[in-house]
Image (tube, grey):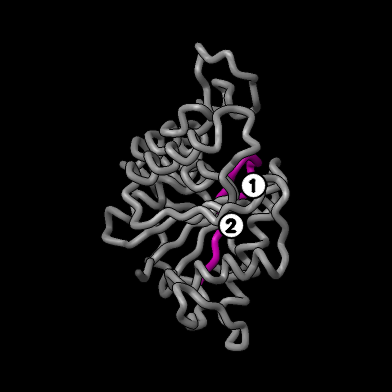
Amino acid sequence: MKLDILAFGAHPDDVELGAGGTLAKAISEGKKVGIIDLTRGELGTRGTEQTRKEEAKAAADILGVSIRENLGFADGFFVNDKKHQLEVIKMIRKYQPEIVLCNAIDDRHIDHGKGSQLVSNACFLSGLLKIETESEGKTQERWRPKQVYHYIQWKNIEPDFVVDISGFMEVKLKSVFAYKTQFYDKDSKQPETPITSKNFTDSIEYRARDMGRLINTDYAEGFTTERYVAVNSLFDLI
C-alpha cells in the first residue's frame, strides 16, 4: 500500500500529541496516512506494554489511519545504527510515502532526538540503489520521501511552518486521550510523571490554540524542517 504521509514516533502517543490534528485533516482530504511506532513504550511509568498496544490501536482507529505498525525497538536504548536504520528503511520502501513526519530534533526525552535522527537518516539512505532490503521475500525498490518534517513535542521550539487544524482539535484530543494510562487521572494511584499532570493535559489544547492565534485561526500544529520550505506562489500562504 502506498501512503501519502508516514508518521514515525519513538513511542506510541508521540504522533498523536505532535501531529494528530494534521493527520486527521489530511485523512479528511482523502490522503492515505500511516503510523510507525519505533518502540512499545515499555519503560513508561504507567501502564503496561499490552495496555499501550491496545491504546495505540484505539488511537489509530479514532484518527482513521490506514496502517499502524510497531518496530519493537528497545524503549530508551535503541540507537541510530545500521541495524535500526535498515528496519526503518524497510518501512519507508514498503509504504513509499511522499512525506515523512518524525520526532522533534531536540527534546526532553532522549528517545525523541534519537528517533528523529534515526528516521531522518533512514529517509536519505532509503533512496540509495546499493542498499538492498527485502520484505515478504521480495527485493524492495529504493524510495526517498520528498519531505521530512519534525513535529514539536515537549520543548517550545520555534516552528518553521504551521498547519491550521481548526475543526480537527476534537479528534486530536480523542486520539491522545485514548492513552488512558498515560495522562492525567485524578483518581489514579500510580506514580506521577511530567505528562500525568493536569497542566500537561491542558497544555495540549492551549498550545494549539496559541499557535492558531498567531496565524489567525482557532488551532494549529507546528513543524520544523531540514530544508527550505518552498511555495509556487505567495498566494499559497494563508
Write down the residue under mark 1. Answer: 157
Residue 5 quadrant: bottom left
Residue 128 quadrant: bottom right
**Alpha-carbon neighbours of circle 2 within 10 Å: few (<14), some, or many (≥20)?**
many
Report if residue 227 is visible in the image. Answer: no
Magenta segment includes 198: no
- The N terminus lies in quadrant: bottom left
Report if residue 132 is visible in the image. Answer: yes
Query: Mark 1 belongs to which amino acid?
Result: Ile
Residue 236 quadrant: bottom left
At 55% across and 32% down in the image, what residue appears? 48
Write down the residue under mark 2. Answer: 224
Q: Position of residue 24 (x, y in %)?
A: 35, 49
Magenta segment includes 154: yes
Mark 2, secondary structure of its residue = strand
At 56% across and 71% down in the image, what residue appears? 89
Name the main secondary structure of what is drawn in magenta: loop
Mark 1, secondary structure of its residue = loop
Magenta region, residue range: 146-159
- The answer to the question of whether label 1 and label 2 lie on touching residues, with beta carbons closer than 8 A, is yes
Q: Is residue 236 above or below residue 162?
A: below
Query: Mark 2 belongs to which amino acid?
Result: Thr
Q: Is residue 186 above or below residue 166?
A: above
**Alpha-carbon neighbours of circle 1 within 10 Å: few (<14), some, or many (≥20)?**
some
Q: Position of residue 181 (x, y in %)?
A: 51, 27
Cα distance in 3D space between marks 1 and 2: 8 Å
At 33% across and 41% down in the image, what residue appears? 62
Left or right relative to 227: residue 109: right
Is 214 in front, or is 2? 2
